[in-house]
Amino acid sequence: MALHPNGVNHLALSTRDVKVQIEFFTDVLGGELKALYWMHGVENTFHAFVELNPSCYVAFVQHPENPDTYELGITHAGTAGGPVAAGTMQHVAFNVDTLDDLLAMRDRIRSRGVVVIGPMNHGMCQSMYFAGPEGMSLEVACGSAIDERAWIDPEVQALAGISADELARFVSPADFDRPASAVAQPGNDPSKPHMAYPASRYAAMLATPDEVFWTAVTSEPPVQVDAV
């Protein structure tokens, strides 16, 4: 069966001022604040969720040791095409359904005094660009499904070192049939991506059964609400 993530549940962004981010994403972009609580398992750290739809959120993490750093080309791109350190967010594009919605979002954002560049017609989508608090590069876009036959450039494919066989695999990834028994946790293979926990702690985590992690953090909300 075809198995892959079907969307972004939440995009977690670092902040030194969660209130400033909440103000921007609720007032300027119109999202609704849905959660603000102590981040599970992380001391002295706030976690906030602003809803884009009931299964998609922008989240913010305010850690007390988040550095007060802003360096174009290193920590931030500054524009939708600027350089930035590999593995960081170059820019993020939020979705709306129609061009009319895109134009309405343009007007909402500008009405809050924020500059918007565009919209531009990229063919594969239509989008506009603007800045968010703490140097974020943001975009809002609309468009239909992308036709890979038209939008995979053979020149760029070659420059990226992607062979014809690799391209076929990338366009149509292998299906996955879940086995009857859970797949065992892999070992610590240095050639694979890994999280940056201290070595001894990470080794203990890899040896911990999944069932233990299921109950490792609280699942109770900070405020008890009567059932409707």
Image (cartoon, helix red, strand yellow):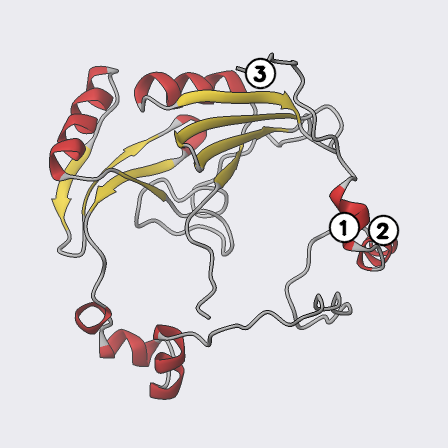
Residue that extends furthest to the front in the rendered view of this protein:
228
Residue lying at 46% horizontally and 70% vertically, measured from the top left: 1
The residue to which callout 3 is attached is 227
Determine crowd level at label 1: few under 14, some 14-19, many 20+ residues with C-alpha closer than 10 A: few
**Tag on residue 201?**
2
**Tag on residue 197?**
1
Q: Which label sits in the foreground, 1 or 3?
A: 3
- The residue type indicated by label 2 comes to Arg
Say whether disc 1 or disc 3 marks the residue closer to the N-terminus: 1
- Residue 17 shows in this picture: no
- The answer to whether 107 is drawn above or below residue 96 in the figure is above
C-alpha span from label 1 to label 2? 6 Å
- The residue type indicated by label 1 comes to Tyr
C-alpha span from label 1 to label 3? 39 Å
Residue lying at 33% horizontally and 37% vertically, measured from the top left: 138
Q: Secondary structure at mark 1?
A: loop
Q: Position of residue 19 (x, y in %)?
A: 50, 16
**Nearest to the observer: residue 14 or residue 30:** 30
- Residue 158 relative to residue 190: left or right: left
- The answer to whether 44 is drawn above or below residue 155 in the figure is above
Determine crowd level at label 2: few under 14, some 14-19, many 20+ residues with C-alpha closer than 10 A: few
Say whether disc 2 or disc 3 marks the residue closer to the N-terminus: 2
**Nearest to the observer: residue 47 or residue 155:** 47
- The answer to whether 124 is drawn above or below residue 181 in the figure is above
Q: Position of residue 220 (x, y in %)?
A: 70, 25
C-alpha span from label 2 to label 3? 39 Å
Query: Do the CB atoms of the residues marked 1 and 2 lie less than 8 Å apart?
Result: yes
Residue lying at 41% horizontally and 21% vertically, measured from the top left: 32
Q: Which label sits in the foreground, 2 or 3?
A: 3
Q: Secondary structure at mark 2?
A: helix
